[in-house]
């Protein structure tokens, strides 16, 4: 289980690096700071999953939660969202080293 969490964390970190690289390239080309919201990035990659998630959340979750939290999250930069997801997955899958150390009997 921890392996899968760490693997998902690595994938999220790679997605964050890719999104950050794309934003930096667009920023250099536009001569101003460009940060792509996660909703735009998701719309470019898979628009059907975005619309299905929005419709299911608006149906099953309280409308206030949908309006406040989900809409706020969709306006955040894609690289930052993926970095937070990678950090959370890594923290959940973290294996604490033994207190005694490596070389104890």
Image (cartoon, rainbow, N blue to C red):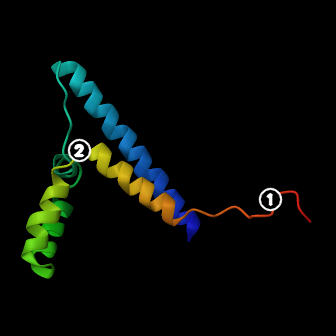
Query: Residue furthest toward the front?
Result: 99
Which label belongs to residue 68?
none
Q: Nearer the viewer, mark 1 or mark 2?
A: 1
Counting labels gives 2
The quadrant of the rendering that contains the C terminus is bottom right
Q: Is residue 10 above or below residue 54?
A: above
Evaluate if marks 1 and 2 touch, with contact meaning CB atoms under 8 Å apart: no
Q: Is residue 47 above or below residue 33?
A: below
**Residue 15 at x, y percent in the picture:** 37, 46
Q: CA distance from mark 1 to mark 2?
A: 40 Å
Q: Residue at x 17, y 64 (%)?
A: 69
Q: Quadrant of residue 47?
A: bottom left
Q: Mark 1, residues whose alpha carbon is within 10 Å: few (<14), some, or many (≥20)?
A: few
**Residue 59 at x, y percent in the picture:** 10, 79
- Label 1: element kind: loop
Q: Which residue is mark 2?
A: 77
Mark toward the start of the polypeptide (1 vs 2): 2
| Residue 83 shown left or right of residue 105 in the figure | left
Q: Is residue 3 above or below residue 27?
A: below
Q: Which residue is mark 1?
A: 101
**Looking at the image, which is closer to me, 64 or 16?**
64
Q: Is residue 66 visible?
A: yes
Q: Is residue 51 visible?
A: no
**Looking at the image, which is closer to me, 18 or 104?**
104
Q: Mark 2, residues whose alpha carbon is within 10 Å: few (<14), some, or many (≥20)?
A: many
**Residue 79 at x, y percent in the picture:** 31, 43
């Amino acid at each position: 289980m921890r392996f899968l969490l760490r693997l998902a964390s690595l994938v999220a970190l790679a997605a964050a690096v890719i999104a950050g690289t794309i934003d930096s390239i667009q920023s250099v080309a536009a001569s101003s700071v460009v940060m792509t919201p996660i909703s735009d990035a998701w719309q470019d990659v898979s628009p059907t999953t975005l619309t299905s998630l929005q419709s299911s959340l608006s149906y099953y979750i309280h409308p206030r939660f949908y309006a406040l939290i989900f809409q706020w999250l969709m306006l955040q930069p894609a690289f930052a969202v993926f970095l937070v997801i990678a950090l959370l997955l890594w923290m959940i899958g973290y294996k604490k080293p033994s207190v005694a150390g490596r070389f104890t009997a």
